Amino acid sequence: MGKINFQKSIHLTKDSFILIFAAYALDVIYARFTTFAWGLWVAPLFLVLKIYLFGGIFATCIDMVFEENYRITLAKTLKNCQKYAWSYLLLLASIVLVYIFFTSLFEAFKQLTFLQAKNHFQFFVYPLIAYLIIISKHGRVGKKGYTKRRLSYFVLVAFIGAYCIDIFLFYFSEIIDVVNFEIPRITLFLSRSLQTFMFFYVAILIADPYISEEKEATGKELYLIRPVSKGLPGYFSRFVVRKYPSFFHVLRALTPADYKVKEFDQKVFSERDYKPGKLVAITSYTSNAFQAYHIARKFKKSGSTVVMGGPHVNFLPEEALEYCDSVVVGEAEGVWPKLIEDYEKGELQKVYFGEPLEKFYEKTDDFILKDLDKNKDIFLEVTRGCKYGCDFCTIPSLSFGRIRRRPIENIAQMIQKTKKKKMFFYFLDNNIFADPEYARKLFMELQKHRIRWVGSSSLDIAKNDEDLDLLKKSGCVELLIGYEIFSLSSEKEKRGKYSLADEYLSLTKKIKKRGIAIKAQFILGFESDTIKSYWHLWKFAFKLHPTESAVSVLTPLPGSQLFQKMTQEDRFINLNWSNYALDRVVFKHPFLNEKVLSVGYYAYYLFFHLTTSLTGHLFLLCLILADYLF
């Protein structure tokens, strides 16, 4: 149990990166101001801000422990800051009392400054702060919740180890000469991260009786699970990519109303979570397939019925059936009602084949309209499928090479029903310009409703100025475009979408000229790529200068033509699905060293994003200004 809590604490600490950075930044600014004579007049203001911010961080951490899919928002954080500022004041007051007590008894403690004492004692006050905030938010737990439990050695070792590391980080800058280095700031950030981790850890231990006391559902219950994702790009995308709807909005829409539905989005499961008598639906990509299989096996062993689906399972159903009771191959819209019916009869089939429905949108539309008050934005899928057949992509196989379209009249009706309360729309299409003629009609219709929207498109949307003018007038503010290659790449010989490679720069300028932001995606590691491709790709992206940029490693995913090719040529060097997170080379490359490309990818990704995109440049500018001012 201690190890599970440890893993959960790490996961929550990663999710709270933005809070850690805010605390770190305020610390740096506060410390810098106090070094100036005039800064002493401003320092009290920053002290008040620090009290409010840290109190809000404590309370937000508690919310994250209790709520599985908690999303940090400015509104919720500010509310916590206002309501729980007392928690940081209590922390400071407790440390003052402990400091006075120890200095009165032990001569050695008189040598400590208050700042040193704070770092020595705050870890031991965290349990009190966490407990009081939990009581404030959730009341007192019943006596049955608190069973007599002994702290495991793992918990003690984790706590003592973290405490010792934090003390070391605090004194590190004083131990060595760091005049010309940024080590003090680095150690401060690491210390803040470690302190947040330990607060999560003690909060999870204290919250355990509350979570254990939750009443079991007496009726039908459906668990919808997306396992923890892997990969640096996916992690950083949480802070730069626009949000998306519930991962299971389709299944929620198709599930009968008498089911209690619970979503677990990237949750770290403990043993008590694997309960009997549930219908458990798990989706997975290739990179988190092993984690999905582990969860499936645990739930099945506990006595629940487990169904698996998703892109990976879609192409390797036999593999998935070793761990679950049933799999869905294809789209869920056409088979989920039948699957529920069979489950209730006790006649669940091993495999359900979901045929593509022409009216794939009907049930989800009803769900969107039903939950209008709960959602701030509207997510619609107007087409499904893509006109291109890129060999690394699984969409052609998933969509059977077809493009399905929602009637324009239906879209107009949906917008009319929703736009009174919601003014921002997200179109979830694979390629909104998959059918140019349809897209033009769509843009003309959207123009009538004066909405703002974002979506994904291929770059050929910019070939015709009239199309671009329609796009702008329709309310488009941002497009996600998969460039994949640079203009000098040999991959453009494959034609298809790459036939426009020589025009990438000019077409992009036309889009940007109309004030539409671009999120650009690139791929490194094509078979024609060499070590020089690193430089060429970066130089090309730098000239392109999109709003946001991301680069991934070419990965042959099951279901893609590239996967079939690598299998036939026996070129795979790694079939561990955990390594298929688009961040490492898993096949024998003719020109690139697989280990060098995989190890160096993380540094290249950060450098690429920070130096080629508008958001990256703004971030670097903030760092430069911060270094100059503070």
Image (tube, rainbow, N blue to C red):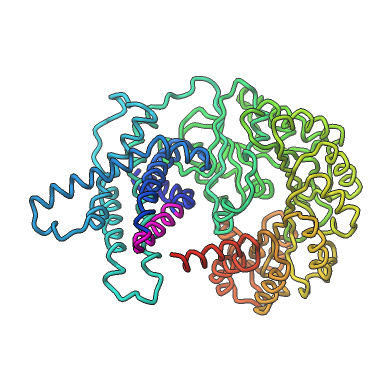
Along the viewing direction, whichever of 361 and 370 lies nearer the viewer? 370
Res. 353 image quadrant: top right
13 and 491: which is toward the camera: 13
Residue at 71%, 27% (x, y): give it: 369
Q: Is residue 478 visible to us here? A: yes
Apparent side of residue 418 relative to residue 124 in the rendered image (left or right): right
Does the stretch in magenta take in 558?
A: no
Classify 353 as above or below 164: above
Residue 2, horizontal then vertical, whole percent: 33, 46
The quarter of the picture where residue 176 lies is bottom left
Q: Residue at x 50, y 46 (%)?
A: 294
Check the image and report above or below for 432 versus 577. above
Name the quadrant of the C terminus.
Answer: bottom left
Residue span colored magenta:
21-38
Quadrant placement of the N terminus: top left
Quarter of image, res 559: bottom right
- Let me know if residue 24 is in the magenta part: yes
- Front residue of 359/100: it is 100
Residue 150 image point, x, y percent: 23, 40
Q: Is residue 505 left or right of residue 204?
A: right
